[in-house]
Image (cartoon, rainbow, N blue to C red):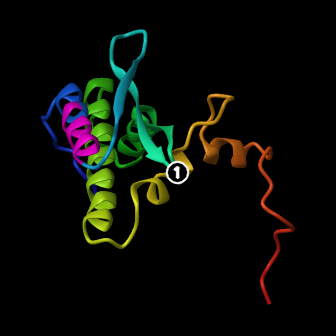
């Protein structure tokens, strides 16, 4: 089965603009883009007020991952198309997350917690993956 949004023609920069709008409409106080050497957006960082403090959260697209999957599926894909697909899928994921906020099933900071950026500029998830964040004994609950 082809990956979601594999035929998108929506430019990545337009999708990132839509992401900005979604985040702003749901409480983001700041939104900032990081750009790569080729001028394409590599990450969207946004600030949410959490417990009286403005906290940063970073969302990244992975066009290289999209290209690998497209190659496995034997589908033609260049870097520009991979960026369009990657950002479109990030936007769809964000839209699904904020649907939970809109129906009061969760809060923005709760949903985006793995994307919280620490003082080391790594997300909470990246810190956890590196083994520098331990959450108790671990193991299996009985």
Residue at mark 1:
51
Q: Position of residue 15 (x, y in %)?
A: 21, 35
**Which structural element holds mark 1?**
loop
Inspect this view and state whether residue 1 appears.
no
For this view, does 7 lie left or right of residue 45? Answer: left
Q: Residue furthest bottom?
A: 142
Q: Residues within 10 Å of mark 1 (few under 14, many from 20)?
A: few
In the picture, which quadrant includes the C terminus? bottom right
112 left or right of 74 in image: right
Q: Which residue: 44% across, 44% down?
A: 49
Q: Choose top left, top right, bottom left or bottom right for residue 83.
A: top left
Using residue 125 as the reference point, say whether residue 31 is left or right of it: left
Q: Is 65 a magenta residue?
A: no
Q: Position of residue 73 (x, y in %)?
A: 35, 49
- Say which residue appears at 50% left-offset and 45% top-offset: 52
- Is residue 22 highlighted in magenta? yes
Question: Residue 113, can we see it?
Answer: yes
**Which region is colored magenta?**
17-25
Q: From the viewer's side, name the closer residue of 128 and 117.
A: 117
Residue at the far left: name it: 9
State the image coordinates of residue 48 (x, y, percent, origin top left): 42, 42
Q: Main secondary structure of the magenta part?
A: helix
- Left or right of 86: which side holds 120? right
Q: Residue at x 28, y 55 (%)?
A: 2
- All told, the count of numbered labels is 1
């Amino acid at each position: 089965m082809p990956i979601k949004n594999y035929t998108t023609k929506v430019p990545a920069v337009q999708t990132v603009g839509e992401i900005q709008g979604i985040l702003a409409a749901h409480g983001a106080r700041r939104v900032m883009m990081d750009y790569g050497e080729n001028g394409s957006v590599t990450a969207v960082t946004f600030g949410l007020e959490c417990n009286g403090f403005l906290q940063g959260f970073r969302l990244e697209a992975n066009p290289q991952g999209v290209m690998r999957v497209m190659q496995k599926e034997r589908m033609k894909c260049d870097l520009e198309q991979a960026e369009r697909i990657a950002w479109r899928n990030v936007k769809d994921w964000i839209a699904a997350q904020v649907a939970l906020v809109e129906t009061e099933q969760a809060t923005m900071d709760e949903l985006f917690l793995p994307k919280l950026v620490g003082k080391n500029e790594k997300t909470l998830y990246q810190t956890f993956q590196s083994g520098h964040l331990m959450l108790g004994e671990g193991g299996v609950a009985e």
